[in-house]
Each structure stands twice: as structure tokens, then as C-alpha cells.
Image (cartoon, rainbow, N blue to C red):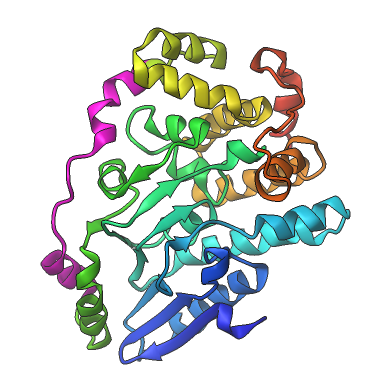
Amino acid sequence: MNEAHLIARKEGALGRLTLNRAKALNALTQPMCEAVHHALSAWEDDPAIAAVLLDAVPGPAFCAGGDIRAIYDLGKAGDPGALEFFVTEYNMIATIARFTKPYISILDGVVMGGGAGISVHGGFQVVTENTLFAMPETAIGFFPDVGGSYFLSRCPGATGLYLGLTASRIDAADMIYLGLATHYLAQARIEELVMRLVRGEAPEDVLDALSSAPDNSKLSEIRTVIDHAFSAGSLEKILIGLTAEKDWGRDAAALLRRRSPTSLSLVQRQLREGAARSLESCLEMELRISGKLLKGHDFYEGVRATLIDKDQTPHWSPDRIEDVDAKKIAEFFVH
């Protein structure tokens, strides 16, 4: 690994991990995931380490996800390394979830996909005025993995399904409201937080002392509408309900119509399944889904349209929600 892509070091009582691929929006590579796993395994039994803090070098993104272009190239070539990336990433997530010491993530900037995976399963998630969160996978013919089956299905009401289907972006206040973050902290106070953790102060006490209440959640204001529309049952009924709403509903319906119909169908089933599963069971399910999507069409077409040709005009197969074969969707969930 290019060691600079993940900077792991000890600072006083703190084990510190810093994502350092600013030009790539700190997208996670397989070696970065391996390095996080190894660092946490070492610090778990290190009496000098009281807590671990994850942050990123200054820039617009905390972590914009996994290195999708690399996965695309490997998958197109039939290289098993494409699926191995997900195995490594999910093992890292399980390690974070099992870590017994305080694990604090500073989500200062864009947080998408893998950026959620490396943070939301830890004990504390600190958001700032710069935080922007999304699970954008349906826009590239994939699905909200990295444990999304687990954490999205546990968001209040139908909000998790709304985020997973539409790939809508939310801010810090919304993350606090949904339970995806624990504390709001002005960016200017992050340095003080780090200094006090380095001195060995208890993370919960420091966070409670430095954090403040964010602005009102915009998502909370439309929660009733979201719950009504996204609890309708089938995707077709959800679209009908959204179209009947005013501007917000029609905008959400327009987003759904641009997403991969196969991905949308997968998300609806995965969150229903995930609500009754443990995190580790969710990750096992997601690995099976990922492997099957890597053998399909929509993931490669979505990445082509979004990241390679950038024409933003993916040609999904099938291209209508009404044409998705329920039997084929069910096959994604078979062991």
C-alpha cells in the first residue's frame, strides 16, 4: 500500500487514523481497509490507547465511498479482486463494530457509501457544518451496502428506505435526527476535541462539553410525507403516491425514475431483510448481492455513465420498474 493513503499513528492516549487521498475524495482502497483492520487489531490490546479517532486530511470530503473505478476495472476484466475488495471492506466494518474502545469519526465534509461504512458502525460520529451524507449506489446500478441493510433499516419510519432508494443528500442536522450521527461540533472546535482526547480525557465527556445542537432537521419536516409515500408497498405504488404530492414528492419520483430499476428492487428487499438481521448477517447478505451484481449489467453501465463517459445517461436493463422480474430479484437473496 501507498502508506500515505492512510496515516495511522499514536498521539498520547489516542490512536489516530487519517484518510489521505484528498484528490480522490478519500475513496477507500483495499489496502486502506486492510490497514484500518490491522491498526484496530493492534490497538485493541494496547493499554496505552484509550480511544481511536478517524478523520481525513482537509478538503471537501471525509470519504466519498469505495474506489468504484478500480472495482469497475477489475470486474470488467473478470478479476476476482473486485469481490475481494468487498470482502476486505466488510471485514474492516465488522472489526469497527466489534472494537471495544471508543471509536470517534469526524465526518467533516462529504460522506458517501464506504465513508458511512467506516464510520457509522463505531461508537461516536461527529458531524459539522460541512457534512453532506448520501448513499448514492442506486445511481450507479449498485445498492447501499457497507452495512446499509442494517443502519438504513433502523432509521425512523421509512426514512432509511427513502435515502436508500433515492440516493438523496442530507446534512448534519438530518444525520443527528436519523441516528446516523451522535454529536454536532463546529469545525473550529475539532482541534480542541483532538487535543483533549490525546490527553486521555473520556470521549463522551469531551464530546458532550464541546458539541451543540444543530439547526432543525429538514428531513423531520417532511417525515410524515416520507413515511406515507415510502410505506406504500410496491415501487409502483410508491411512485404513484409521490407523484400525487406537491413539489417534494414529484422531485423524489423523478429521482427514482433515474435510478437503476434492478437496484431499486434490491434495496426494498434488502432493507426488509436487514431489519431482522444482525450487522454481521447483513454483511454476509450484502456480499452475496455484491458478487451477483458484479456479474450483471447495471453496475458497469452506471459507473460508465457516471464516472467514465460522464454522459449521465445510463441505459439500465431492464429500464422500467414495471419490467423487473421478481424471481430474478429473489435469486440475489438465495445462499
Q: Is residue 99 above or below residue 166?
A: below
The quarter of the image holding the N terminus is bottom right
Q: Is residue 46 visible in the rendered structure shown here?
A: no
Indicate the quadrant where residue 289 lies. Answer: top right
Task: Please name the predominant secondary structure of the magenta segment in the image.
Answer: helix
- The residue positioned 29% from the left and 50% from the top of the image is 172
Indicate the quadrant where residue 301 lies. Answer: top right
Tell whether position 189 is magenta. Answer: no
Depth check: 190 or 148 in front?
190
Q: Is residue 182 above or below residue 155?
A: below
Q: Name the spot of residue 254 as percent of width and height, x first.
A: 51, 21
- The residue positioned 40% from the left and 7% from the top of the image is 244
Depth check: 322 or 244 in front?
244
Q: Name the spot of residue 52 as percent of width and height, x first.
A: 37, 77
Q: Is residue 167 visible in the rendered structure shown here?
A: yes
Q: Which residues are magenta?
A: 202-228
Q: Name the spot of residue 247 as percent of width and height, x first.
A: 35, 17
Q: Name the spot of residue 134 as percent of width and height, x first.
A: 45, 45
Depth check: 289 or 264 in front?
264
- The residue positioned 44% from the left and 62% from the top of the image is 61
332 left or right of 296 in image: left
Depth check: 140 or 96 in front?
140
> How many numbered circles are shown?
0
82 left or right of 26 in image: right
266 left or right of 40 in image: right
Q: Is residue 155 above or below residue 238?
A: below
200 left or right of 239 in image: left
